[in-house]
Image (spheres, helix red, strand yellow):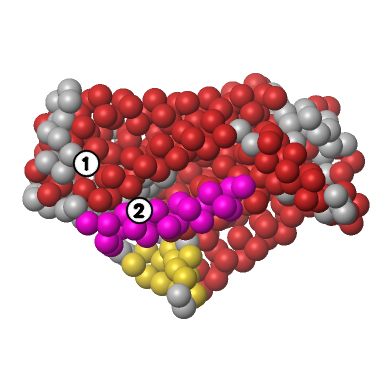
Amino acid sequence: MTGMFDSAFHPDLPTRIGEKLFEINWGLIFFITLIACVGFAMLYSAADGSLDPWAERQMLRFAVGVLVLLVVAMIDLRVWMSLAYPAYGAALLLLVAVFLFGEIGKGSRRWLDLGPLTLQPSELMKIALILALARYFHGLNFAKLSNPLFLLPALAMIAAPAAFVGVQPDLGTAILIVAGGLGVVFVAGLQWRYIVGAGLAAASLVATFGEWFWNERLHDYQRLRIITMLDPMADPQGAGYQILQAKIALGSGGIWGKGFMQGTQSHLNFLPEQQTDFIFTMLAEEFGLMGSLFLLVLYIIVLGYGVAIALSSRSHFGRLVASGVTLNLFLYVAINTGMVMGVLPVVGVPLPLVSYGGTAMMTLMFGFGLLMSVHVHRQMEIPRSHSLLF
């Protein structure tokens, strides 16, 4: 490990930093900034033409986030590999702290109050898990991947944080952690026979224990969210209110929208959580189908950058990190937009770079920094011997 740090922090560090800044993919940063600017505009509109209380803070967070991105991008990939397991352990300890001492809000225990800072450790775990899984699989050859015993540590790394997040309760984030982790496992080279076998096993478990899980393990509000997704008109003034108002906002925007700050659903306070989870519907009402497609195209471009960076990396660790960060972004966008359109249950998943939120913004920018680090160090080959389980 010492050698990794020595090679990263060389006496010629200023020269190396200059060279690495030249290697930064500024096109990716440009499109990330465009998406963030869409968020600033929507938060300005949500506050009825005021930078306070959301847009101004979000701008400051994004500016700090860009600096975090650049610093993370400059650091040698081998350093991030050496920090992968400690980061995972620290994030897991924070989840345990939430379980024991976390702040309760909106019926769940998800945040740690650290004085001037409120932290949501489940967001940090999404990145820490990607790093830990990437390091683990970097050290395995394909022969070992054919042995299911070598998958058990990875599955345990995924299951532990998912369990702690699930009991908060935050089923949506727990599903994101599991999906993101399994995505890294798949990219690592998991054989199709295991994928098919896991799918059949999951189907069997659902058939056997589905009714018990529905009645005994799901909370009432979680069952209600699924029922509401299938039939929001069953309780239009109660459980179905959020999704019905979101659909009205989506449809009333038409092709070109009602105009900036002219949305009635949002500005007459019919639209719930318009600055966070339902900000996409506010955009659709004010800028219509064209505005919504514009934002989705921006996300697709960023996702394309992520896939290209993953494919260009010569190190297995870099490929897995870039793939994990890209998949994490895709899941955020897909789940948030699917939720507000009524095709997925309503869960607390923000729209990346657009929804208001501090921990989510900084975690996302740190993830982009890791993606950029993979790009900057894409020619680096890391021997598999540098990645051991312990």
The number of callouts visible is 2
Q: Position of residue 57 (x, y in %)?
A: 37, 60
Q: Amino acid at mark 2?
A: Tyr
Q: Which residue ends up furthest to the bottom in the rendered image?
A: 115
- State left or right for residue 149 relative to residue 184: right
User: Residue at left 62%, top 47%?
Assistant: 70
Q: Quadrant of residue 86?
A: bottom right
Q: Which residue is mark 2?
A: 356
In the figure, 383 relative to 116: above or below?
Answer: above
Question: Residue 248 versus residue 41: which sits nearer the camera?
Answer: 41
In the figure, 123 relative to 335: above or below?
Answer: below
Q: Amino acid at mark 1?
A: Met
Q: Position of residue 18 (x, y in %)?
A: 73, 43
Q: Which mark is residue 282?
A: 1
SS at mark 1 in the image:
helix
User: Residue at left 32%, top 54%?
Assistant: 55
- State left or right for residue 268 relative to residue 152: left
Q: Which mark is residue 75?
A: none
- Image quadrant in which the N terminus is located: bottom right
- State left or right for residue 42 relative to residue 135: left
